[in-house]
Image (cartoon, grey):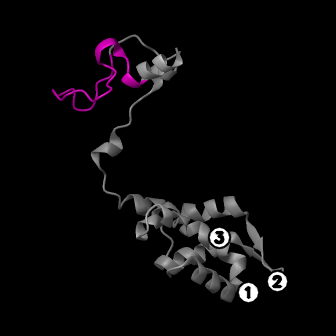
Amino acid sequence: MGHCYHHALSSAKRWGGTADDYLPLHHWFDESKSITADFRHRALRHHAEGLFMLERFFGATITLSTGRVVPVRLIGEQHVIEDFGFIPSFADWVRCIRPEPWMGRAQPIHRSVDPFAATSGPAPIARGQANGGERAMGDPGRSGDTWPVAAAFATAAE
């Protein structure tokens, strides 16, 4: 399948009504094309969790122009199966993402925002530091045990 309109036509053929009855649901699945206009856009919603997200956005059922009530999740399953032939899990997508170093560089902010955060004791050891590696930028073990970002916010607030 290529376009959400064709998915909507397929839904109308299967459950009745018109393509317009289904278009908002199929458009929701494919909105992520605005982020990346190739098959990778499907990683955001084309999986089992995406089917439940569809229900949260549109409700458990929709009522067609003919008055027939159709479960939203069935329509979502039809869309994903037409694209893949099966319904992957989000874990199936994640296993295909190649980890990059920047993905694991989360910086803890608790010391700069939590007034009750413990400030005594030794600074935590950053990855690579235990075996002689350099400290990461913004490592709390730097001079004054403060973060550059925290200093910027403090200056801006004054």
> Which segment is the magenta one?
123-149
Q: Residue at label 2?
A: 66
**Amino acid type, mark 1:** Gly
**Residue at 49%, 20% in the rendered image:** 156
Majority secondary structure in the magenta region: loop
Q: Earlier in the sequence, mark 1 or mark 2?
A: 1
**Amino acid type, mark 2:** Thr
The dot on residue 16 is: 1
Q: Examine the image and state in which quarter residue 151 appears.
A: top left
Placement of 144 over or under 45, stated as above or below:
above
Callout 1: SS: loop
Q: Earlier in the sequence, mark 2 or mark 3?
A: 3
Q: Examine the image and state in which quarter residue 141 appears.
A: top left
Q: Residue at label 3?
A: 25
Determine the CA span between mark 1 and mark 3: 15 Å
Determine the CA span between mark 1 and mark 2: 8 Å
